[in-house]
Amino acid sequence: MVDAEDRDSGSGSGSNNNTGCSDPPGTRFEAKQAAPSGLGLPKLHTVMCKGLSSLPSTCLEKAKGMRIKLSHLAEMHQKHKVQDGRTFQNLEILLSSKSGLQAFYSFLRLEFSEENLEFWLACEDYRVSPSHLLKTKASSIYSQFINPDAPQEVNLDSETHEALLSVMDSPCADTFHKAQQRIFSLMSKDSFPRFLRSHQCMEVIKAF
């Protein structure tokens, strides 16, 4: 007759024979808990790839186009920044910069010679005006800046005065070219060097 201890011992031996060895306590439970985290990353990667591939081609094209536009804007910003950094090399580059033009005009007003820049700008506008407006604009420029009684008379020699007066009845796109060049040269040699040492110029530099 087998007592209870022998039965318990026999059942235990039978269990060991079936499995080969007994698992440490909690091992099977921990393995089951660890499995999902190990399998989650590949599944997540697969889901993300499927999600991207399922996007409409138009969305992908728009995203690509936006990236190209942003890259182009960044290049243009850098280009203008470099150009602005060169504004002080000569007057021509300065006047092509909006901030430089404004600073130079403010400086000329302090020197009571802003009429030179205003005349130069009026000539720039005149050059690109439609032909049917040339006579009206030419008369306005002459009255404002060239006539001896002009409120903002610019410093031109008598020869240039007479040449302009003789063509006021039939002006062309180049009517004020010579006078404009003379005033530009005057600003470049006289006002511009002083501007480079002015407070206005320093303020523009700080903005870069």
Image (cartoon, rainbow, N blue to C red):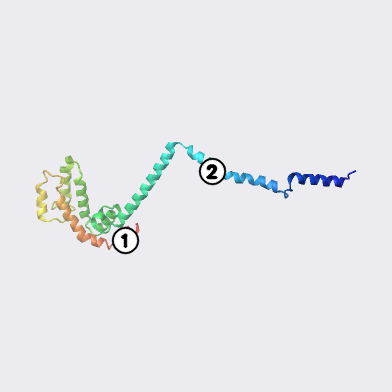
Q: Mark 1 points at which residue?
A: 202
Above or below: residue 108 compared with residue 10:
below
Residue 109: image location, x then y, percent: 25, 57
* Earlier sequence position, callout 1 versus callout 2: 2
Exactly how many numbered labels are in the figure? 2
Residue sitting at x 51%, y 39% = 50
Residue sitting at x 40%, y 43% = 66
Q: Residues within 10 Å of mark 2 (few under 14, many from 20)?
A: few
Residue 130: image location, x then y, percent: 19, 41
Instruction: Identify the amino acid type marked 2.
Output: His
Q: Which residue is nearer to you in this view: 187 or 111?
A: 187
Determine which quarter of the picture holds residue 111.
bottom left
Above or below: residue 130 compared with residue 88:
above
Q: Name the residue under label 2.
A: 45
Q: Which residue is nearer to you in this view: 168 or 75?
A: 75
Circle 1 — which element?
helix
Q: Which residue is nearer to you in this view: 52 or 198?
A: 52
Residue 81: image location, x then y, percent: 33, 54
Work out how far the residue at label 1 is from the one at label 2, CA to CA, in angstroms: 56 Å
Question: Is residue 136 shown left or right of residue 72?
Answer: left
Q: Residue 102 carries which label?
A: none
Determine which quarter of the picture holds residue 184.
bottom left
Residue 103: image location, x then y, percent: 29, 56
